[in-house]
Image: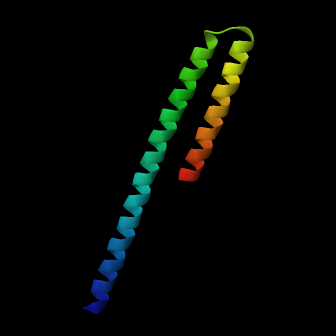
Amino acid sequence: MKKVLATLAIGLFTLTLGCGAYAASDEYKAAKKHEEANYKMAKAECKKLSGSEAKSCKKKAHADHEAAEDKLKAMK
């Protein structure tokens, strides 16, 4: 009987860990989609500008995107 209970406890623990990893994966995917949308919006705003303003806007958008991706990688 103790073996059965131990096996059930281990199975339940493994299932719990698996569900937690799945939830974290969903959270990561949602954050990634949100970041990609933000980056696309920032690039679209830069297209409205011209010359050096557009260039600096694109650089800022890219730097912000890279920083957000680094945070996402740390989250994963």
Q: Position of residue 61 (x, y in %)?
A: 63, 26
Q: Find the residue positioned furthest to the bottom.
A: 2
Q: Quadrant of residue 12?
A: bottom left
Residue 28 to residue 1: above or below: above
Can residue 21 be seen in this snapshot?
A: yes
Can residue 76 be seen in this snapshot?
A: no
Q: Image check: 53 left or right of 44?
A: right
Residue 54 to residue 70: above or below: above
Residue placed at 36% from the left, 72% from the top? 13
Q: Quadrant of residue 7?
A: bottom left
Q: Position of residue 34 (x, y in %)?
A: 48, 34
Viewport quadrant of the N terminus? bottom left
Residue placed at 65% from the left, 37% from the top? 66
Residue 73 to residue 61: above or below: below
Q: Position of residue 40 (x, y in %)?
A: 56, 23
Q: What colour scheme governs how the chains and residues are painted in the rendered image of this protein?
A: rainbow
Q: Nearer the viewer, residue 53 or 13?
A: 53
Q: Find the residue positioned furthest to the right.
A: 52
Q: Position of residue 51 (x, y in %)?
A: 74, 9
Residue placed at 51% from the left, 28% from the top? 37
Count how many numbered circles sit on residues in the image: 0
